C-alpha cells in the first residue's frame, strides 16, 4: 500500500500549535512623530490615523501603546522651520525636539523602550541627510554631526539609536563616540539596507523632510541590487551595529530573507509610510479588508526572517495577537 503524506486537519487549536512562524509584542516598534508646540495632535493627511504630537500630548499615544502591550517606540523629531540650517545644528542641540521629548518620556514612562532615529534630513534647510559641498553630499564631514546627534539622544535617555542617513562609516563614528563617553552598552540599530524608494513619500510629508533639490539616490540603495544589501549589512556589523534593518519591508522580503540567512545579529524590517497608506486607502475604498491584510503582511515579514518589526500598525497587531488572529 502506498503511503502518501497528507496535511494535518487544520483545526484552530492545531494551527496555533504547529505554526512555523511565531511572533510576539516585544518585537514590535511603533514610529511616532513629535513636533514643536503645545497642545498639538494633528493628523497627517497622507497617513490616515497617524498624528504629529507636541511633547505635552505624547501621553495620548503612549498610554494607548501601554494598554495594548507595545513597549518600544521609534521617535522622529520635527523642529520649527526657523530652526533649520544648512548644518542641521538643531539635530544635536541639548534643547532639541528629540532631546526634550526623550527626557519627558523617560520621566513619565521609564519602562518604555525609546529608540531615536538619527539623521539630518528633518533638521537641514535643504532636506538632505548629510552636509553639502556645493550640490553634493559630503559623506565624511557628516559623520561627526551624526555621532554628536546620537550622543545627545543617549545623554537625554534614549535606550537605542538608529542611524538612517546611509552615510558610509557612520556606525563606526557613532560607536566610537558612544564608547568614548562611557555608553558602551547602548545598542545601535542600523538602517543598513535602505533603498531609494517611492514608498517614503508620506513620511516626507509627515516629517517635512523632502529634499529641496535632487534626490537621495546617491546615498540610498538602488532597488535593483541585492548583493549590495549583503555587503552593506556586513560592513555595518563590522563597524559595531547590533541590529540590521531592511527598509522598506513589503517589496524587499527577499532581501530580508537573504540578510537574515547571512548575518548573526537580529534583523529588523520597517513597513514604511507608503505601505501603510496603501492599506488604509484600499480599505477606505472597500477594496481590501484592512485587518486581514495587516495580519498577512506582518506574518510575511516575520516569515521572511525579521525578528523586529517597525510598523505604524503596531497597536492593531498587538490587539490581533491578543485575539489569536496572528502570532
Image (spheres, rainbow, N blue to C red):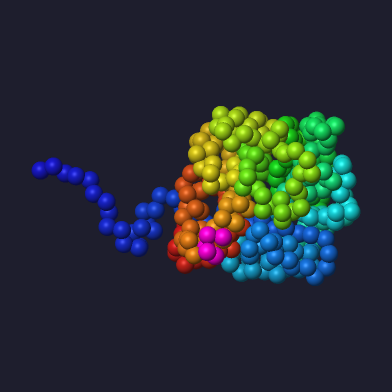
Q: Which percent across, then down, holds residue 121?
A: 77, 45
For residue 264, what is the image quadrant? top right
Q: What residue is shown at x 61% (from left), y 69% (from top)?
A: 67
Picture quarter with the N terminus: top left
Is 212 part of what is drawn in magenta?
no
Residue 14, given in percent of the width and then of the height, sits at 33, 59
Residue at 86% of width from left, 49% of height from top? 84
The span shown in magenta is 281-285
Prevailing secondary structure of the magenta residues: helix
For residue 242, side relative to residue 87 (left or right): left
Q: Whole-percent x and y of residue 232?
A: 63, 32
Above/below status of 161 relative to 48: above
Residue at the left extreme, as displayed: 1
Is there any visible trace of residue 103 in the rendered image? no
Res 1 visible: yes
Residue 320 position within the rendered picture, expressed as x and y whole percent measured from the top left = 50, 64
Front one among 23 and 135 = 135
Amino acid at each position: 500500500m502506498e503511503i502518501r503524506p497528507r496535511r494535518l486537519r487544520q483545526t484552530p487549536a492545531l494551527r496555533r500549535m504547529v505554526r512555523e512562524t511565531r511572533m510576539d509584542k516585544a518585537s514590535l516598534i511603533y514610529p511616532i512623530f513629535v513636533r514643536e508646540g503645545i497642545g498639538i495632535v494633528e493628523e497627517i493627511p497622507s497617513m490616515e490615523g497617524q498624528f504629529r504630537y507636541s511633547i505635552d500630548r505624547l501621553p495620548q499615544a503612549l498610554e494607548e501603546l501601554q494598554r495594548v502591550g507595545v513597549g518600544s517606540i521609534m521617535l522622529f523629531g520635527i523642529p520649527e522651520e526657523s530652526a533649520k540650517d544648512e548644518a542641521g545644528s538643531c539635530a544635536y542641540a541639548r534643547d532639541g525636539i528629540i532631546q526634550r521629548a526623550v527626557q519627558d518620556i523617560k520621566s513619565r514612562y521609564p519602562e518604555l523602550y525609546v529608540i531615536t532615529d538619527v539623521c539630518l534630513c528633518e533638521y537641514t534647510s535643504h532636506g538632505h541627510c548629510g552636509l553639502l559641498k556645493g550640490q553634493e553630499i559630503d559623506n565624511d564631514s557628516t559623520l561627526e554631526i551624526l555621532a554628536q546627534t546620537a550622543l545627545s539622544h543617549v545623554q537625554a535617555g534614549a535606550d537605542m539609536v538608529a542611524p538612517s542617513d546611509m552615510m558610509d562609516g557612520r556606525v563606526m563614528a557613532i560607536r566610537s563616540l558612544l564608547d568614548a563617553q562611557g555608553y558602551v552598552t547602548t545598542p545601535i540599530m542600523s538602517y543598513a539596507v535602505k533603498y531609494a524608494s517611492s514608498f517614503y513619500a508620506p513620511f516626507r510629508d509627515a516629517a517635512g523632510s523632502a529634499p529641496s533639490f535632487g534626490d537621495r539616490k546617491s546615498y540610498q540603495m538602488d532597488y535593483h541590487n541585492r548583493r549590495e544589501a549583503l555587503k552593506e549589512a556586513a560592513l555595518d556589523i563590522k563597524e559595531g551595529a547590533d541590529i540590521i534593518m531592511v527598509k522598506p519591508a513589503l517589496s524587499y522580503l527577499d532581501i530580508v530573507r537573504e540578510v537574515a540567512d547571512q548575518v548573526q545579529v537580529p534583523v529588523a524590517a520597517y513597513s514604511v509610510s507608503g505601505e501603510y497608506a496603501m492599506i488604509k486607502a484600499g480599505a477606505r475604498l472597500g477594496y481590501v479588508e484592512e485587518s486581514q491584510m495587516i495580519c498577512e503582511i506582518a506574518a510575511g515579514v516575520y516569515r521572511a526572517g525579521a525578528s523586529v518589526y517597525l510598523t505604524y500598525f503596531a497597536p492593531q497587531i498587538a490587539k490581533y495577537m491578543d485575539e489569536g488572529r496572528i502570532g
